[in-house]
Image (cartoon, helix red, strand yellow):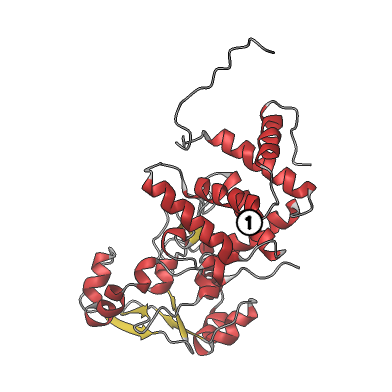
Amino acid sequence: MDPAPSREIADMTGAAALPRKNGELVFDEAWQGRIFGMTVAMSHESCFMWREFQAHLIDEIARAEREGDSSSYYERWLRAFEQLLADKGLLDAVVLAERTHDFQSGRRDDVF
Amino acid sequence: MSGTHDHHAHDEHGHHHREPESVLSLRVRALESLLVEKKLVSSEAVDRIVAAYEEDIGPHNGAKVVARAWVDPAYRARLLTDGTAAIGELGFGGVDLQVVENTPGVHNLVVCTLCSCYPHALIGLPPVWYKSFEYRSRAVREPRVVLREFGLDLPENTEIRIWDSSAELRYLVLPERPAGTERMSESELAEMVTRDAMIGVAVVQPPAGAGRGSGVR
């Protein structure tokens, strides 16, 4: 069974605070929910500590703000997540690029 | 092949372009497929986690409590007598709770003057202003002015009661049920109840076309 939603995640403050509206989480696009869920799932599996991800996220937000890029919160989240996975040796950027291309070209159409 | 003139584009790398949503979506699908293959995540776990956080982080649970109290007078009485036990009946808990009821002459407002005690389990994350020093001090000192700034202009003869939350006891406002909602179902009613109304900085607004629509605006 999954652990209950964690206050450590739900109550992140400052720039890292989860976007919300009327107190509820806001996912503007479906992929934003997927990347949120994957990140939480992997922290449940102890692939990393939540605070490690949070540190990457804060760094990525700071970098984006410094460089004045207009990326959304979850685009920054995605970059932070990819960077963390790469640091942990869990993801190869080249393999991800190839797989993305497979989806883009229609060679793959499902996650499985 | 030799002789080929390698042509490197010398545009500035490290300059991040905002990618179109579709590319981001494809990239996330690709990422999920790789992580699933490596058995680092399962898509079912991701589904469950997203649903759990959407359910937990938000005022849904509190809204269900309020809607039940509106449709079931016996439940309402139990809720006002022993909030902790009454929310337990609906499967919520984790905090000692006192529910305070708005009536035509009385408006309740919740604050935590010391820190940011808040009934998370019922209404999700506290908004930023709830934790601000300004709200914590002014809600007690000049509640009528603060409420007006939230867009809630109460009649002069309405009594405002302030409830100061603590680590031991949290408060939840039971808002007044708006007129014109008599024919709405319990779940339709729950959709109308906002976080702000359960803190007491707003009232529940009657919906346009009350009693006829699905409750979705």
Q: Nearer the viewer, residue A93 or A103?
A: A93
Q: Is residue A111 above or below residue A14?
A: above
Residue B60 seen in the current view = no
Q: On the rendered structure, is B170 left or right of B5?
A: left
Q: Is residue B20 above or below residue B4?
A: below
Residue A29: percent from left, percent from top: 55, 44
Q: Quadrant of the N terminus of chain B?
A: top right
Observer-nearest of A70 and B75:
A70
Q: Quadrant of residue B53?
A: bottom right
Residue B196 x %, y %: 40, 67
Q: Residues within 10 Å of mark 1 (few under 14, many from 20)?
A: many
B61 lies left or right of B35: left
Name the residue rendered at 69%, 65% in the picture.
Answer: A44
* In this rendering, position of residue B4 left or right of residue B146: right
Q: Secondary structure at mark 1?
A: helix
Instruction: Give residue A15's quadrant in the image.
Output: bottom left
Q: Nearer the viewer, residue B116 or A23?
A: B116
- Residue B97 appears in the picture as rendered: yes
Report which quarter residue B105 is drawn in. bottom left
Q: Residue at x 42, y 53 (%)?
A: A62
Q: How many marks?
A: 1
| Residue placed furthest toward the top | B3
Estimate the x, y position of residue B12 in percent, counting from the top left.
Answer: 44, 31
Q: Chain of mark 1?
A: A
Which residue does the numbered mark 1 point to in the structure image?
Answer: A39
> What x and y, as percent, mark residue A61?
45, 52
- What amino acid is found at the position of numbered circle 1 in the picture? Thr
| Front residue of this view, candidates B182 and B38 | B38
